């Protein structure tokens, strides 16, 4: 069967992102994607090899979008300005694209070369930002893990409604990042 005009991998991913962002990753199914594209489910197999492949492609697409967002936000910035900009776009990405953000965490096979390549680009940009503090090697990786844990934990709690107190959550985020940066400045790697 030949591919339907106007339906390509890009269109499929666009619909999958829309579903993920509005309904959650669990709702990204071949049947729903096909329905939204006004095609029969088997027609998707002209572009993907099933749901697992769609989720992998969605994860890679999400990581590429996430990387581009982070890279653009940190160009020309250093130290605290770069970290704060990175934090801002990280949280904004997760708020704007909650499903796509989730897809970046649910890569079907983390040992997959394509998935690793896309994920490592994100890690590399954070390491480059933290390098300005004199962090290298394992220290840079530990700091990267720490920052990612802070941001992912914050985003996850926010998405699940975990911040019920009547306080501005962005003020809380800034407080947390100020604390993180104070710790980074106190390290003796510089």
Image (cartoon, grey):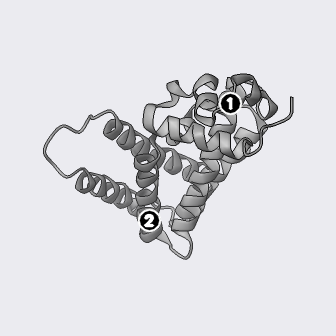
Q: Position of residue 152 (x, y in %)?
A: 43, 41
Q: Position of residue 174 (x, y in %)?
A: 29, 58
Q: Answer whether labels 1 and 2 touch (C-beta < 8 Å).
A: no
Q: Position of residue 102 (x, y in %)?
A: 51, 36
Say left or right for 39 vs 184: right
Q: Using the image, determine if residue 147 lies above or below residue 51.
A: below
Residue 187 sits in quarter: bottom left
Q: Furthest residue to the bottom?
A: 76
The numbered disc on residue 39 is: 1
Say left or right for 49 vs 73: right
Tell me which residue sits at (24%, 51%) in the image. Answer: 172
Residue 92 sits in quarter: bottom left
The numbered disc on residue 106 is: none
Q: Residues within 10 Å of mark 2 (few under 14, many from 20)?
A: some
Please give the count of numbered marks on the rendered protein. Answer: 2
**In what quadrant of the picture does the N terminus appear?**
top right
Which comes sooner in the sequence, label 1 or label 2? 1
Of residues 77 and 160, the one drawn nearer to the viewer in this rendering = 160
CA separation, marks 1 and 2? 41 Å
Of residues 6 and 185, the one drawn nearer to the viewer in this rendering = 6
Tell me which residue sits at (60%, 59%) in the image. Answer: 68
Please indicate, yes or no, whether residue 119 appears anywhere in the rendered image: no
Which residue was labeled with disc 2? 85
Q: Using the image, determine if residue 131 lies above or below residue 165.
A: below
Please indicate, yes or no, whether residue 165 appears anywhere in the rendered image: yes
Q: Position of residue 138 (x, y in %)?
A: 60, 48
Q: Furthest residue to the left?
A: 166
Discs 1/2, front: 1
Of residues 138 and 108, the one drawn nearer to the viewer in this rendering = 108
């Amino acid at each position: 069967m030949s591919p339907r005009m106007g339906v390509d991998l890009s269109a499929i991913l666009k619909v999958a992102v829309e579903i993920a962002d509005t309904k959650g990753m669990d709702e990204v199914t071949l049947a729903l994607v096909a329905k939204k594209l006004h095609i029969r489910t088997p027609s998707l197999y002209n572009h993907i090899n099933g749901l697992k492949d769609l989720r992998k492609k969605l994860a890679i697409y999400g990581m590429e979008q996430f990387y581009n967002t982070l890279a653009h936000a940190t160009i020309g910035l250093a130290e605290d300005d770069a970290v704060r900009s990175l934090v801002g776009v990280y949280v904004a990405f997760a708020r704007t694209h909650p499903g796509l953000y989730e897809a970046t965490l649910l890569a079907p096979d983390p040992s997959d070369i394509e998935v690793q390549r896309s994920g490592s680009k994100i890690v590399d940009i954070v390491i480059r930002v933290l390098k300005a503090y004199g962090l290298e090697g394992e220290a840079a990786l530990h700091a990267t893990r720490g920052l990612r844990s802070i941001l992912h934990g914050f985003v996850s709690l926010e998405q699940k409604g975990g911040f019920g107190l009547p306080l501005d959550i962005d003020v809380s985020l800034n407080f947390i990042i100020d604390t993180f940066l104070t710790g980074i400045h106190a390290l003796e790697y510089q």
